[in-house]
Image (cartoon, grey):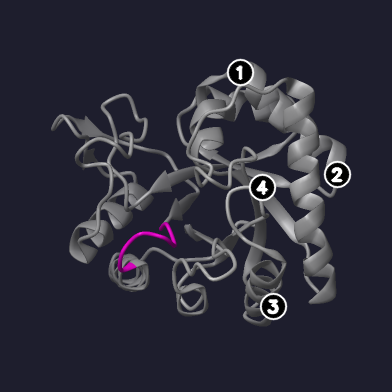
Amino acid sequence: MIDINSDMGESFGAYVMGDDEALLGYVTSANIACGFHGGDPRTIDATVAHAAARKIAIGAHVSYPDLVGFGRRSLRVSADELITDVLYQIGALEAFCRRHGSAVRYVKAHGALYNDLADNKELAAAFADALVAYGGDLAALVLAGSPAVEVLAKKGVRVVREGFADRGYTAAGRLVPRRQSGALITDPAVVAERGWRISTGAEIEAADGSPLVLEVDSLCVHGDTPGAVELARALRGALAGHSVQVAAFA
């Protein structure tokens, strides 16, 4: 059994990003931007409404405060800054969830923050402290195989190990940086095959050609990836074809 999550709610004002409503037809968890890297009150409200109507699990997609850089620039922040920024974002999303009869079930970091806390134990500990402080048994989506998995678990946070069907991996199990060739995979057939292979514990090919096996609980298809809806559709078809059940972890 595997969860499929996607980043969404990232449009801002007149700038539209992704086809969230269509994508919700193929995912089981929605990581909704909370205004720090994307999303505005109207976008967040509409995305939550659509997700709640489909009974999709809702998670807070939290970020460094970096609208200009879409949250893809690393910022040097203290533990207290990270804790308060994460709490602020979860609380904002929770308000819209309450309006639509839902609730925030988990938290996933976005962009640079996601990559930074994967290997920075102090940052991961602060992230965990924010979730514990918020309460409500929030789960955390974390890069599978990263030190952050153990750090959050030791803090009492339920950890959900995440893999990526539409991103390239290094031999060490880290995501290929977006500025490098092979970082983003947009071929539906390739995404579908990598998705079912990751889900079943089969080998995939890392960027250097070496075999890589990942243990994951959830697969991500980025909502801003070109053709994201078709990628998600192909992924669901491949999972069904390999008898992999799809269900939300939250």
Q: Nearer the viewer, residue 196 or 183?
A: 183
**Label ID, residue 97:** none
Secondary structure of residue under mark 1: helix
Instruction: Tell me the kind of residue under disc 1.
Output: Lys
Looking at the image, is mark 4 or mark 3 nearer the viewer? 3
Q: Residues within 10 Å of mark 4 (few under 14, many from 20)?
A: many
Secondary structure of residue under mark 4: strand
Instruction: Tell me the kind of residue under disc 2.
Output: Gly
* Residue under label 4: 107
Q: Which residues are magenta?
A: 221-227
Q: Residue at x 78, y 70 (%)?
A: 102
Alpha carbon distance from label 1 to label 3: 35 Å
* Residue under label 3: 49
Q: Residue at x 79, y 24 (%)?
A: 80
Magenta stretch encompasses residue 217: no
Q: Residues within 10 Å of mark 1 (few under 14, many from 20)?
A: some
**Residue 37 in the image, given as x and y percentages of width and height:** 58, 49
**Residue 235 in the image, given as x and y percentages of width and height:** 32, 66
The mark that comes first in sequence, 2 or 3, is: 3
**Label ID, residue 135:** 2
Q: Nearer the viewer, residue 123 or 13?
A: 13
The mark that comes first in sequence, 4 or 1, is: 4
Instruction: Tell me the kind of residue under disc 3.
Output: Ala
**Residue 176 in the image, given as x and y percentages of width and height:** 30, 34
Left or right of 135? Residue 151 is: left
